[in-house]
Image (spheres, coloured by chain):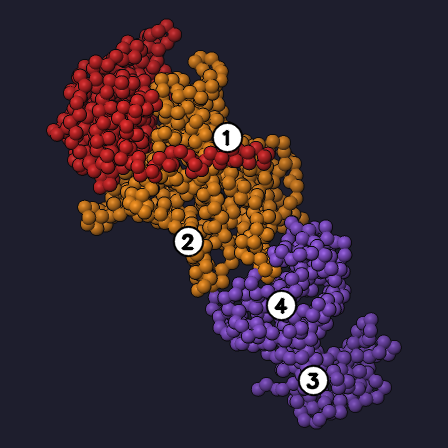
Chain colours: A orange, B red, C purple
Amino acid sequence: MKRILALVGLAAVPLAVLGVFFVLPVSGMLAEGFWVDGRFDPAAVAEVLTRPRTLRVIWFTAWSALAGTTVAVLLGVPAAHLLHRRRFRGRGVLRALLLVPFVLPTVVVGVAFRELIGEAGPLGFLGFDGSAGAIIAGLAFFNVAVVIRAVGAAWESLDPRPAEAAAALGAGPAHVFRTVTLPALRPAIVSAASVVFLFCATAFGVVLTLGGLRYSSVETEIYLLTTNLLDLQAAAALSIVQLLAITALLFVTSRLRAVADPSLARTTARPPRVSRGDWPSLLATLLVIVLVGLPIAALVVGSLQVGDGWGLGNYRALTTVGSRDALLVPATDALVTSLRTAVDATWMSLSLGLLVAVIVTRRSHTRAERRVRGLVDGLFMLPLGVSAVTLGFGFLITLDEPPLDLRDSLLLVPIAQALVALPLVVRTLAPALGGVDDRQRQAAASLGAGPLRTFVTVDLPIMWKPLLAAAGFAFAVSLGEFGATSFLARDETPTMPIVIFHLIGHPGAMNYGMALAASVVLAATTAVVMLAVERLRVPSLGAF
Amino acid sequence: MLAPTLAVVLAASACSVIGGDDDAGKDTSSGAASKRVVLVTHESFVLPEELQRQFEKDTGYEIETRASGDAGALTNKLVLTKENPLGDVAFGVDNTFASRALDEGVFAPYAAKLPEGADEFLLEGDDDQRLSPVDNANVCVNVDDTWFADKGVTPPRSLDDLVKPAYKDLFVTSGAATSSPGMAFLLATIAKYGDDWPDYWADLMDNGALLTDGWSDAYQVDFTQGGGKGDRPIVLSYDSSPAFTIADDGTSTTSALLDTCFRQVEYAGVLDGAENPDGAKALVDFLLSPEVQAALPDSMYVFPVDSSVQLPAEWAEFAKQPTDPWQVDPADIAANRDDWLREWSDITSR
Amino acid sequence: MLTLDDVSVAYDGVPAVVDASLRLEDGHVLAVLGPSGSGKSTLLRAIAGLEPVASGRISWDGSDLDGVPTHKRGFALMFQDGQLFGHLTVARNVGYALRLRRTPNAAARVRELLALVGLEGYGDRLPATLSGGERQRVALARSLAVQPRLLLLDEPLSALDAGLRERLANDLRDILREAGTTALMVTHDQEEAFTVADRLAVMRGGRIVQQGDIAAVWRAPADAATALFLGYARVLEGAAGGVLLRAAGLAGADAAVAVRRSALVVADSGPLSGTVLSARVTPEQIRLVVVVDGIGELDAVARLDTHPATGDQVSMVVDASRLAVTPTRH
């Protein structure tokens, strides 16, 4: 009992933050749907679920997310092999660049994609524009990096000897992969796939932009219902579906993940060079480079186009407010705002994430305690699965009375971004923390070191790299966050994605070019941060 | 490689938002509260800094802007928070959403003195003038005249023309469910074709119309004169858009079809329950002042309601406004929006 | 003085330690001996404050330790594999607790401790460069640095190879004696227990089945199973036990008798005779299995200069000091 109390004490701060900035707003919005004119009316919500349109939307969300996840896994696993188990020149740069899409604002990616696959684009002949295929390609574009990271981290530290033993027993490479390597990688693949599925199922911009409005997902439907039709019953019904589906998913994957995590048995063997036998991974990596590289290349090319010629004019224009004052502040100021906000979001998600990681990785003494820890683990994943618009509206209607009158607080944007980054931070820190031998802490404690001193002596020397890595991740996520930020950002201090959105939403060739240039700057900033993190060589970076 | 990261982090944290930004103090100092007027608006709101400073100097009020979401999100935000409003004054509710806001009692009456010519933009049914018109813009089909000249094809002139085989696969528009100009275009077709509008839309889709998420996708990516140089020469945009496609020879490469337009009017109003109603009224007056009215075209790409204001040169020459745009009664819009959008979605995703 | 009164510890409702009572006077070294899974490590962790006690009381000099966190108990804990802090040098590892307490002259004390464990001059090395035995010595020095009220040793030698283990066990005993440290050591190895400790507690199935002075426990195992665990080779029940006792010249009643492997010695003549079943030469003596008339199969030893072969008839004498009469349990 006392241990559970201690657990709750440790969890108090993150739980309070989650309660105030997530549970409260979301339940506020759900309540708006369930209470019609002050009367509790769940029937109206239930009725929504029987509408054919609702069912169609749910069905599309499920299968498109599954397809996007499948593509991301099929491309990501072999690419992870090449990028994490083979050695070649430029590997670090490539790994960092592949993470860039993950943090690019969807509005820009949508434009970049459509420049390629639109009727007039170089890939227009594929007839991909406005098809479900385009949506799935877009989903894979955003998420393949997650698979590469997560699986690559596990693969990198996999003990190679079982595979060698199998080979010595006469198993061919394919057989070794199927019987030895794949089972060992399963937890990593499952958890990566589950997070990617979450990202896919809650994707917003990709579905709208690339689907040519022919497709609706649960997320886009909630957005339209809430902001356009103010049909809060229907929105509440879909939000409940989302929450239930995500809870179920987290439950299933926590079971599948419960196999001993192979990434903890770290090895430091130097990876071999690429050989002819690596052709499947080479092929997959090339496909990934094409998938990720082409839209980014389209962005870069577009940003360098000035009138009918080429030049850096769009980049120089970033220090202005755009042609005819399209912006209140120059894009460079917005970059500074973005960086400042990202610093705040980073320290917030890092401190919360560290506490959560400590809570979920400490050894449990009883089954009840283990359940509580599992619950905490799942709880902090939930923000991934709730629509930004539900959260945004929820902020406005629930955080409006003292002592929680936070609607105009400057903290709201970094806090919202920190919540978005939190699951990633926890998933980066938890494996590393879990890999620390608990007896080291006990040894320190028995020598008279208190909990804080123990943490500094035992955990910190092992944790500082994962901490920096998680910081990089949170930083980049915050730099790219658009959904919640656009809802909360105040006009005087727009962040970079908001400025890009502004620029691209106004006519004038210069504004368009500036939007692309600003995106390239944002992408480059992200890549630099990721590259710096990459140099730290943290095996569990981004491993969910 | 570690050093640059740390340098960036340290440099940025030295001036992080929380770490002693002067804005933070402004919010909490209670003395300033009565002098503060909070403007709730949509994300497209932009006004030159100097004008805002001038207002603050003239009236002693300090403007604080909360800008986020589009017109729809703004309206619904105001409705949801009407018990405890987000600010003192709202700008950006348009004639397609205004009825809902009025029905829900979001705005308090304030009969601001309107500039010359603004009367014609007053909202139908707003009898005690809760909303004051600030700007207007017409959503019109635009064509790329150079493209049609090159091909030797006569450009379309009307909504009827868009379903003709000559213009097959040439039209791109943003969707009604996801964008405000798209909604305006749907309303134009409803105004013109009445109950037969679904048939028109079915023909339009059969004729290869391309739907996009938002205005920027349609104009910037698919339109032949947009930033991305697409391949469709007919696009849904605004009556002011031709002023932005001026070629080196000083003529515009595009024009708006003035028979296809739906007029959008944006309103400002004092919020019911505002903490600072006097400041709110002053801010509405400010938005109607000649200085702001004159700044609207360049800042927000819209026409002023004040007919005496001088337009920028390109606007005067190339941004032609329709004399008799299509209109739908705001009350009808409020009553039927959901049904129309559902039916429209069914037709276009068929 | 450490006192345990009816201490029970459970994992998830499954009892690991049941009603354990112990006392350990200052200056003594107690070995808790038990097979793996007997609950001995759990008991040690409970004393260290690493496991919550389900019921009962652990106290030091009469004051209850319940609620006192590990780092405030003043008990140093030494693990099987040392658990040195890999990023700190040997000297910094040893001086860890001294720095925590801001002890003056810590450097001198560290040198002294390194000398005590026989590692002079190792101060600047990193743990990764040390052998297993050296690492354990460093861990020991680290634990002793603050002169803990009680030193808890969790299988301190079992990760080492046989020869090293024996040598280090002797060193450990000498170091503990010299420092006058009160210590509680958990082990599954009776040799190690006999070498290092002066008190012994035997655990089985979560219970302490016997405790006392090490020689006393060794001479009189509480039951057959304890006897076998303490290194007795066989336990004879009923009539066979009586035969053996009489051959040893002890009281004649039938009883359960625990017999060490070397209790029977082949001699030219003796009270027992039997047929050799197998013979195996070791460096010190020949180990035999003999079918003893009136008893059955028993172990015996012979001097290296004799050459008993399978099937030979031999006579044997009994070394009474290598027998223990145990109470029979019904």
* Gap in angstroms between the C-alphas marked 4 and 1: 57 Å
The residue closer to the viewer here, C62 or A120, is C62
- Does residue C272 show up? yes
Left/right placement of residue C65 relative to residue B261 reads right
Closer to viewer: mark 2 or mark 4: 4
Name the amino acid, label 4: Arg
A148 up-or-down from B145: above or below: below
**Chain of the residue under the numbered disc 1 shown in the image:** A
Closer to viewer: mark 1 or mark 2: 2
* Circles 2 and 4 on the same subunit: no
Residue on which disc 3 sits: C324
**What element does badge 3 sit on?**
strand
C3 up-or-down from B191: above or below: below
Residue on which disc 2 sits: A12
* Circles 4 and 3 on the same subunit: yes
Q: Quadrant of the N terminus of chain C?
A: bottom right
**What element does badge 1 sit on?**
helix
Residue C240: % across, % down = 69, 88
A473 up-or-down from B234: above or below: below
Residue on which disc 1 sits: A525
Q: Residue at x 53, y 41 (%)?
A: A469
**What element does badge 2 sit on?**
helix
Residue C45: % across, % down = 57, 66
**Chain of the residue under the numbered disc 4 shown in the image:** C
Left/right placement of residue C208 relative to residue A201 reads right
